[in-house]
Amino acid sequence: MRNRRSFLTAVGAAAATPLLTPLQAYTQELSGRRSVGTSRVPKLKVTQVRAVELQGTGHNFAQYVRVYTDQGLTGTGEMSGATGAAWIINERLGPALVGRDPLDIEAIYSHFWGWGEIPGSIRGVFVRGMGGPFLSAMSAIDMALWDLAGKAMGVPLYRLFGGKVRERIPVYFWWRNDDDVRRMIREKKARAFKMGIDKVTEDGDPAHRLDPGKQSYWTLTNRELDTIVEKVEAARKVVGPDVELALECHARYNTESAIQIGRAVATVRPLWLEEPVTSDNVEALALVHRSIPIPLAAGENMYTRYGFREAIEKQAVSVLQPDMCKCGGLLESRKIASMAEIYHIPIAPHGTSSPLGQMAYAHVCATIPNFLILEWGFLFAGTELNALMRNLPQYDDGFVQLPDSPGIGIELNDDAIREKLRPGSTWS
């Protein structure tokens, strides 16, 4: 019996050895790699962070940030609509990043969020302060860090956010004029447009207004409402029944006028009515939402998941529109989308960035189950901005294609950037 047991033990060990040897070898290989990094990812340290503001691009808020590392890898991000954000990065947030591992993105975000002191006696964003240039600066750094992480790992950005749930990203464009819209539908197979109806009110006859000098919180007269309906019905005839038509209000109306608009344009079946009232009063948004027979969209002026929470929980809107360049960044936007998913609210991110920022959005949108459509303003209309890019997104029949190159997949043309620098800005 003893001999039989010894024989079986020896046979089992011999049989297991060929199976275990590759695993042991791989484990030893990983152990060796960890001396310089984790798995195949290099161990990195931030050496510099630089942000710039541009001029003469045809876009008022062209601002970029780049994170540099000790091994030559860089990541680039973009800010939107925040005067002073570049200074905050160069003088406050950037110096706090030097020496840190750029792949610790959540830790860095939490540090800036108020967990740690920032050089110059600035404490984070004042413990979850909402909006403003600090949050835009954080959003840009977040994007740059994700771009850098993708390059370090050799994968496109969407891989870092859980992988794709769709192959292509549906996009919509801005309504410029009737002829341009017809051309876009004919030549580019555009599937959706957004028309600013507040412009109809602003450019209308002052004699039709109750208060001719008023520029916001408008109370509409019957004549003004009729004009809006006429314009929207004409727009529907231009695009036809198969192209989606969203209506933008830029928060220019009061609650009652917003309800009147939503009811009056219902026969045109718009994709949504966007920000007819300001987003700072969620109860007012909810009232409009409950009172109109068409979808209500808002969110470009909401910030972080904490700022979106009330609108989501009260289901005050039909569609949420976070702006990833200023609401907290890519990861924060992904968290907002997950919160909205629980309440069956789709996400249609606001997008007024250059192709760099827009493509970063697209990567995140590819991973969001409740994503609807992405605003895309400069793909065909922003020649000055497009000239800042070394490569541009691939567009096909109403969709933007996701690149498989590491990171965002869009690179800046540094020579073109230097030509557009505002005085006092430098670009490494």
Image (cartoon, grey):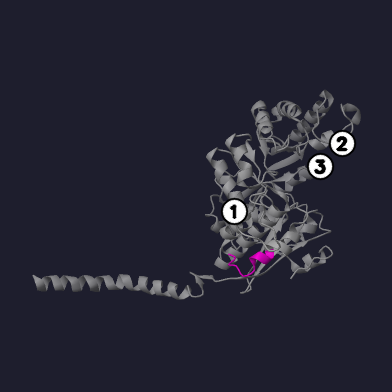
Q: Residue 100's spot in the image, x, y percent?
A: 60, 67
The residue under label 1 is: 331
Asked whether the viewer can see residue 318, the reply is yes
Quadrant of the snapshot with the C terminus: bottom right
Query: Mark 3 Cα within 10 Å, few/some/many (few <14, many 20+)?
Result: few
Query: In the image, is residue 199 above or below residue 136?
Result: above
Under tag 3, what secondary structure?
loop
Which of the 4 quarters of the picture holds residue 267?
Answer: top right
Q: Quadrant of residue 300?
A: top right
Check disc 2 and give the amino acid type: Asp
Tell me the distance, in whole angstroms, between the alpha carbons under discs 3 and 2: 15 Å
- Residue type at tag 3: Asn
Q: CA distance from mark 2 to mark 1?
A: 39 Å
Seen as rendered, the residue at the extreme front is 121
- The residues colored magenta run 94-102
Q: Residue furthest top?
A: 222
